[in-house]
Image (cartoon, rainbow, N blue to C red):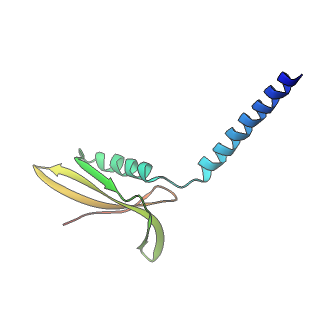
Amino acid sequence: MKARNAVIVAGAGIAAGFLVKQQLDRYQKITPEKALKKAKEAFNKQGPISGSWIYMKPEEYEKNGLLYNAYRGGITRNIDGENKQYEFFIDVDTGAVIESAETA
């Protein structure tokens, strides 16, 4: 009888853990690593990337009168033998690229 109870308790614990993880994944904000991956995928469509970086701490960013909580990062691309650098901002909540621009 005790072994059966242990199996039932273990099964209930595993099921509860699975449900909690699904709920956390649904409402969790995007990680800096995932944000950088999305930016690299977007930039890779226009050509190869030679370097990238991202700040791990989100910052407030304003665009068109709207305030975003965003990650700031950068991409380096080699175009015609010349390195060009781009800075981007990615929304922490949705993972959407808010803005990207070439830096001087």
Q: Is residue 93 left or right of residue 35?
A: right
State the quadrant of the C terminus.
bottom left
Q: Provide residue 63's location: percent of width, then percent of height.
A: 41, 72
Residue depicted at 42% across the width and 49% down the height: 33
Q: Residue furthest bottom?
A: 65
Residue depicted at 83% across the width and 22% down the height: 3
Q: Is residue 36 above or below residue 11?
A: below
Q: Residue furthest front?
A: 2
Along the line of sight, which residue is nearer the eye, 7 or 83? 7
Q: Provide residue 95's location: percent of width, then percent of height.
A: 46, 55
Along the line of sight, which residue is nearer the eye, 46 or 26? 26
Q: Is residue 21 left or right of residue 69?
A: right
Q: Is residue 81 above or below residue 55?
A: above
Q: Is residue 86 above or below residue 46?
A: below
Residue depicted at 26% across the width and 48% down the height: 46
Q: Is residue 60 left or right of residue 103?
A: right
- The answer to which image quadrant residue 56 occupies is bottom left
Q: Provide residue 75's location: percent of width, then percent of height.
A: 27, 54
Q: Is residue 21 left or right of residue 86?
A: right
Q: Is residue 11 above or below residue 97?
A: above
Q: Provide residue 24's location: percent of width, then percent of height.
A: 63, 49
Q: How many marks?
A: 0
State the quadrant of the N terminus.
top right
